[in-house]
């Protein structure tokens, strides 16, 4: 993969406004949404799945470039996706886009740290790899690593953030997530979990001050979808209180990510998040705390992209494909800023981003999806 000069800066209101203007007269109303004074596309590209090989690297780079060309300016990745190769594919795509006239300031780059990532491929001896790269270097101690694979100490996150910046050839990311912090709860009690998360947030607020990230948050798989008394449950209210205690009302905990799709609608309907004296859904709580919700798993790794009942297809506008229908549900949901869709092939990008020209579904249409009788 070719070396590139570092792209400076983060997404800006001017840059993302310019990006939105590129699609004036083409994009449907409410395709772009304003979040933290940035314009974000309601469909973003994810980079989770795929083989750790050069062919997949090339396909991801091509897909990311095409996605930005067609109206998706939100790119989501993580240090451990494809053993750092996804971040590097993002970096290659950003370099190509920059050469073709898309400025860094137009694109919203999101990545995550928490899992101990391999480098390009799995090592022969995992323990030896961890010892040489993290323990012996003083980046992490065994007692700080939960389940042999997850760490969120300030020292570790600093190392991972610097690595992500190098991988993508940027000097700032727009949203940096603590990746699946619920992984810690299987190894440490709740009070220790909150102590560790506080340390992570303190580091991330400092990284904002240093200009290395613009906002931070948490990206979870199960934490925000659990019952309040479950062992892996995350309270957004408590997280917001911790962030406020560290950074005041101008704290930078402004993005969270969790799965939402036709098979997993809990974020919309499950009242498991405390807000004041009542329990509300995750999206309602997030709105109250000034936090933007990004949906992952919009197609549940393809499971919500095929075989949908005709009644659901009808409710969501009788779109050309099941994949478009599944995405339409997620990006139309109230309180969702962007629906992330894993797209490693240009043909999938072109199919899915045909939704640029389609207005989101109405709330009545969304509700009717769950009123269907089998």
Image (cartoon, grey):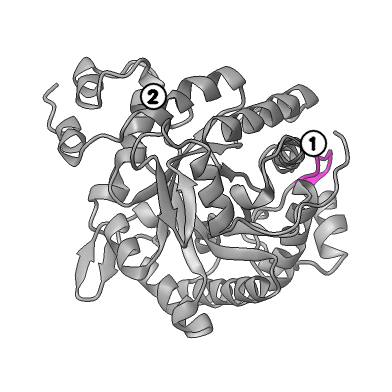
Is 234 above or below relative to 169? below
In the picture, residue 289 is in which quadrant? bottom left
Residue 8 vs residue 218, the one in the foreground: 8
Q: Is residue 149 magenta?
A: no
Which numbered dot is residue 324? Answer: 2
Image position, residue 82 (x, y; %): 69, 37
Label 2, secondary structure: give it.
helix
Q: Main secondary structure of the magenta part?
A: loop
Q: Is residue 311 left or right of residue 145?
A: left
Quarter of the figure that contains the N terminus: top right
Q: Which residues are magenta?
A: 118-126
Give the tally of numbered discs.
Answer: 2
- Sequence-first tag of 1 and 2: 1
Q: Is residue 120 magenta?
A: yes
Q: Residue at x 50, y 76 (%)?
A: 251
Mark 2, other Cα within 10 Å: few <14 / some 14–19 / many ≥20? many
Q: Residue at x 65, y 62 (%)?
A: 151
Mark 1, other Cα within 10 Å: few <14 / some 14–19 / many ≥20? some
């Amino acid at each position: 993969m070719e070396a590139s000069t570092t792209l400076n800066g983060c997404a800006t209101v001017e840059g993302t406004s310019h990006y939105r203007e590129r699609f004036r007269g083409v994009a449907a109303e409410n395709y772009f949404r304003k979040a933290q004074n940035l314009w974000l596309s309601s469909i973003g590209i994810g980079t989770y799945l795929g083989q750790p090989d050069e062919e997949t690297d090339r396909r991801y780079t091509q897909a990311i470039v095409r996605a930005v060309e067609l109206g998706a300016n939100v790119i989501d990745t993580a240090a451990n996706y494809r053993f750092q190769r996804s971040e590097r594919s993002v970096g290659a795509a950003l370099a190509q886009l920059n050469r073709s006239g898309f400025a860094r300031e137009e694109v919203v780059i999101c990545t995550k740290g928490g899992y101990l990532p391999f480098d390009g491929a799995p090592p022969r001896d995992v323990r030896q790899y961890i010892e040489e790269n993290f323990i012996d270097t003083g980046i992490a101690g065994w007692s700080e690593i939960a389940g042999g694979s997850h760490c969120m100490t300030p020292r570790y996150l600093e190392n991972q953030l610097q690595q992500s910046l190098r991988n993508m050839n940027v000097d700032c990311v727009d949203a940096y997530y603590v990746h699946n912090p619920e992984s810690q709860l299987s190894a440490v009690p709740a009070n220790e979990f909150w102590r560790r998360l506080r340390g992570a947030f303190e580091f991330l607020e400092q990284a904002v001050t240093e200009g290395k990230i613009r906002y931070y948050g948490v990206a979870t798989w199960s934490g925000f979808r659990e019952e309040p008394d479950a062992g892996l449950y995350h309270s957004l209210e408590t997280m917001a209180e911790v962030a406020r205690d560290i950074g005041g009302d101008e704290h930078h905990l402004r993005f969270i990510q969790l799965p939402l799709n036709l098979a997993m609608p809990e974020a919309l309907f499950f009242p498991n998040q405390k807000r004041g004296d009542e329990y509300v859904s995750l999206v309602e709580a997030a709105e109250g705390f000034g936090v933007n919700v990004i949906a992952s798993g919009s197609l549940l790794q393809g499971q919500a992209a095929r075989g949908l009942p005709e009644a659901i297809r009808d409710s969501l506008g009788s779109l050309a494909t099941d994949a478009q229908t599944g995405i339409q549900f997620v990006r139309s949901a109230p309180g969702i800023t962007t629906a992330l869709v894993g797209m490693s092939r240009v043909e999938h990008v072109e199919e899915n981003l045909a939704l640029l020209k389609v207005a989101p579904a109405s709330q009545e249409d969304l509700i009717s999806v769950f009123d269907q009788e089998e």
